[in-house]
Amino acid sequence: MEHSVCTGAGFGCRNAQGIRVLVVSDVCWMREALAVVLKADPAISSVELSADLVGALAITPVMTLDAVLLDATLPCGHSEVRRSREIAPNAPPIIAFGVRQTRDEVIAWAEAGVTGYIANTISQAEFVPIIKAILAGEQASSGQVVAELLRRIAVLASVVEGRQYPAELAPSELALTERERQIAELITGGLSDKEIARRLNMSLPTVKLHVHHLLGKLNVQRRSQVILRLHGLNILSH
């Protein structure tokens, strides 16, 4: 698979002696095994372990860490990232590891607020170099993911600014993502965008973006048409 590299302002390493990381996973053997791998690399100066992201950041001084490595299989991991950003806005970069490199998966983590991700196809030898690259402001990703990110940014900008996004940016495929199905169910339940944002712990602009994608895929103009369209396509069972 071809990969593109997104670059940006690097975070650098606050510790000249090496990178200090916190590994978060609710699977004990997973965080301990990863700690062994990291400690064997001279680029890593210290490794702390925790089963709870929010709890760890609440008691760990952020200046003692350069990066947080978060197990992508952690239950409610996306919500944990959002909550951690609220309680510790100056927290170090959060890097999700073990991420399935699909458009929906990567974008879901991006929306949650991670700085970067490490795909589940990465080998042990590549782990630390990728961490260093992310801290330097780079992220290797598939061309499809990059294209989808660019498209969503363009659509989101249009939504926030109250403009109609160009037809070529509108989603053409009918298959709904898991998030779009969730939002569709809530729309048919009568919830507003603000209520959906609160229910799903998402930002209002992100919800509006998903709603626009949903309307585009269903080829309808109004939220009130969603339930009829979904039933007509047998997408909803009730």
Image (cartoon, rainbow, N blue to C red):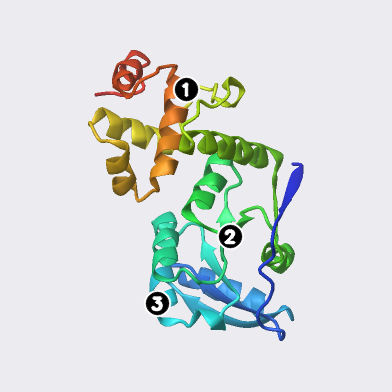
Rendered residue at 40%/65% (across/down): 86
Q: Amino acid at mark 2?
A: Thr
Report the residue at 70% width, 69% height from top. Answer: 128
Residue that appears at 74% across and 81% down: 42
In this orientation, does residue 10 appear?
yes
Residue 92 pos. (x, y %): 55, 71
Q: Which image quadrant: the N terminus?
A: top right
Residue denoted by label 1: 217
Height in image: 125 above or below 76?
A: below
Q: How many labels sit on residues?
A: 3
Res. 174 mark: none
Earlier sequence position, callout 3 versus callout 2: 3
Counting residues from the N terminus, which is met first, the one under dot 3 or under dot 1?
A: 3
- The amino acid type of the residue labelled 1 equals Lys
Q: Which residue is mark 3?
A: 58
Query: What percent of the width, then of the height, locates residue 191?
Result: 25, 35
| Cα distance in 3D space between marks 3 and 1 | 41 Å
Dot 3 falls on a residue whose secondary structure is helix
Earlier sequence position, callout 1 versus callout 2: 2
How far, Cα to Cα, is label 3 from label 2? 19 Å
Which residue in the structure is indicated by mark 2?
Answer: 115
